[in-house]
Image (tube, helix red, strand yellow):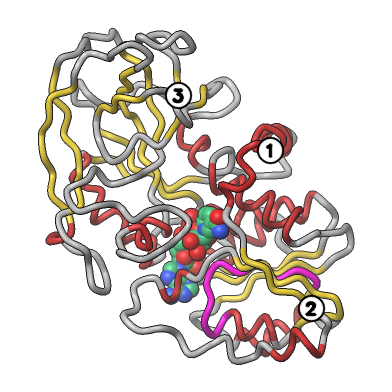
Amino acid sequence: MTDAATPPFTTRQVRLRERPVGYPDDSTWETVTEQVPAPGPGELVVRVSHISLDPAMRGWLNDVRSYLPPVGIGEVMRAGATGTVVASEHPAYAVGDAVMGSFGVTEYAVSDGSGVTKMDLDVAAAPTWLGALGMPGMTAYFGLTDVGRVQPGDTVVVSGAAGAVGSVVGQVAKAMGCTVVGIAGGPEKCAWLTSIGFDAAIDYKAENVLKRLREVAPKGIDVFFDNVGGDILDAGLANLRRGARVVICGAIASYNETSLPDGPRRYMSLLVFRATMTGFVVFDYEDRYPEAVEKIAGWIADGSVVARETVVTGGVDAFGSTLLGLFEGTNTGKLVLALEEDGRGVTAG
Ligand code: NAP
């Protein structure tokens, strides 16, 4: 596609209108049209092609102390995204470069280059750079290896197993010689997990997870990688092996709750099984991302890791409804919004 985009021009962007109580809805967001200025010295302008949808976004809407400040009322919604440089006064970026960064829910973004990295589209298409080769893949890799201290021969159980992080966790653990059990919602997702090499998959919507874990991991769990929290975390805690590592990656089951969860109720298993439970934030590993990208790209290339994305095509105003899909489980693998080809949309990947 030829590049007719030279600023100044307009961009549609999604801003936070009001903080949601419970699930976000139409009143949470507003779509506004803004002028994109020509880049100043040290700046670049990116035409966004794909926007990442992340469960953490729900947390960023709450006015609470966290690992990142909340998105402010009236601010463009924070989001990882990929795109193409369309104008640059930055020495490290040229027009036409395929890049990824925290560009927000917008058609065009002006950036000073902070946190922007170049993507090699010969290695993988843009959606994969938001998934297995992006932040979720980094989360899987460092959560498993560094926090979970996984060893060959371990029994690894992962919840949210058919999602962006979980599907990479399970496959990386298999590539490292572990026995892997996934917990996911519905028969299709469970069938997909076993088709990509998981030793067993438990459908938490239809099965008793605590009992099934006892059957499929009779010696107990060495690494429980939890993305969900609540009853699923309790089921994992009830099935630990001595010296187990419980990795607290997320707790999606509670992100839209308006009161605090009651658990974990089985935490005394940590004492009984001399286990540890450790939370982590992937951004602490930013310096080591290249190491994980190289490893995961290698596993994708040799077929050990299948990178899957659910790509929804739409305008930026489809962001709010697309985000809800994460909490309804409509995605398998990484959920991505591909901006429509309307003269301001997709070029990369
Ligand atoms: P994802 O797994 O691709 O998508 C979310 C999935 O969660 C859905 O597909 C759904 O799958 C499942 N889910 C939704 N509501 C649920 C519920 N009430 N009970 C059980 N499962 C539910 O999302 P992701 O980006 O890979 O993130 C997964 C987790 O990792 C999240 O908790 C996220 O916050 C966390 N995370 C943490 C870090 C970190 O640095 N610590 C970084 C990235 C992500 P089913 O159909 O199977 O229900």
Mark 2, other Cα within 10 Å: few <14 / some 14–19 / many ≥20? many
Looking at mark 3, is its residue's CB closer than 8 Å to ligand 1? no
Give the residue drawn at x 80%, y 69%: 155
Q: CA distance from mark 1 to mark 3?
A: 18 Å
Residue 172 visible within the image? yes
Residue closer to the observer: 62 or 299: 62
Residue 200 visible within the image? no
Give the residue drawn at x 57%, y 20%: 122
Helix or strand or loop: what does disc 3 sit on? strand
Q: Is residue 81 above or below residue 63?
A: above
> Most extreme residue toward the right, as rendered?
153
Which residue is tagged 2? Answer: 275
Residue closer to the observer: 165 or 194: 165
- Does 177 appear in magenta? no
Mark closest to the chain's N terminus, 1 or 2: 2
- Does 224 appear in magenta? yes
Magenta region: which residues? 222-232
Mark 3, other Cα within 10 Å: few <14 / some 14–19 / many ≥20? many
Q: CA distance from mark 3 to mark 2?
A: 41 Å
What type is the residue that disc 3 sits on? Val
Which residue is tagged 3? Answer: 99
Helix or strand or loop: what does disc 2 sit on? loop
Q: Which mark is residue 288?
A: 1
Q: Is residue 133 above or below residue 164?
A: above
Q: Quadrant of the N terminus?
A: top left
Residue closer to the observer: 42 or 226: 42
Q: Quadrant of the C terminus?
A: top left
